[in-house]
Each structure stands twice: as structure tokens, then as C-alpha cells.
Image: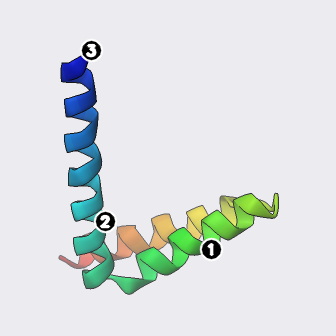
Amino acid sequence: MIARRIRRAIESWQQWRRNRVLSRALPEIMDRKQRIAAARVSHRKIKPIVIEQRAHMTKILRRT
């Protein structure tokens, strides 16, 4: 039980670090994340935003 909590805390911290590094390198990612959150709050569709983000990430990955 304690090990699970420790693991979740570590994974949460690692995810925060990855998001922070990614958002510094690609600020568009954080912008889309905020747009998705706002769409969810207002019960709007997020599929167009997700499709846009996937296309952008594919473009970036092919470039490298």
C-alpha cells in the first residue's frame, strides 16, 4: 500500500518534469492542453484539437 503511494508520487513528479521540458521546447503543446481542458469544462468536442495535436507531433517527429 505504501509502495503504491510512493510509486504514484514518483510517477506524478516524473510526468510533471516531462511536461515541463516538453512545454518549454514546444509551447504549442501547452496551448493545446489548455484548449482541451477548456473544451472539457464547457462540454465541447476535443477531437479536432486532438487531431491537430497528433498532426503537429507527427510533423515534428518526421522532421528529426
Mark closer to the observer (2, 3): 3
Of the numbered discs 2 and 1, the one sitting upstream in the chain is 2
Q: Considering the numbered disc 3 on the image, is that residue within a helix, a strand or a loop?
A: loop
Left-right relation of 40 to 37: right
Q: Considering the numbered disc 1 on the image, is that residue within a helix, a strand or a loop?
A: helix
Q: Residues within 10 Å of mark 1 (few under 14, many from 20)?
A: some
The residue lying toward the viewer, choosing from 63 and 39, is 39
The vertical placement of 2 against 43, above or below, is above
Mark closer to the observer (1, 3): 3
Residue at image coords 68%, 59%: 47
x and y percent of residue 25 in the render?
A: 25, 83
x and y percent of residue 24 in the render?
A: 27, 83
Q: Would you name the residue on which mark 2 appears?
A: 19
Residue at image coords 29%, 59%: 16
Marks 2/1: CA–CA distance: 16 Å
Q: Would you name the residue on which mark 3 appears?
A: 1
Q: Amino acid under label 2? A: Asn
The residue lying toward the viewer, choosing from 12 and 63, is 12
Numbered badge on residue 35: 1
Q: Amino acid under label 1? A: Arg
Residue at image coords 33%, 82%: 26
Q: Amino acid under label 3? A: Met
Left-right relation of 37 to 16: right
The vertical placement of 9 against 54, above or below, is above
Where does the N terminus fall, quadrant-wise? Answer: top left
Residue at image coords 33%, 77%: 23
Q: Residues within 10 Å of mark 2 (few under 14, many from 20)?
A: some
Of the numbered discs 1 and 3, the one sitting upstream in the chain is 3
Q: Give the image quarter of residue 8.
A: top left
Which residue is farthest right? 43
Q: Residues within 10 Å of mark 3 (few under 14, many from 20)?
A: few
Of the numbered discs 2 and 3, the one sitting upstream in the chain is 3
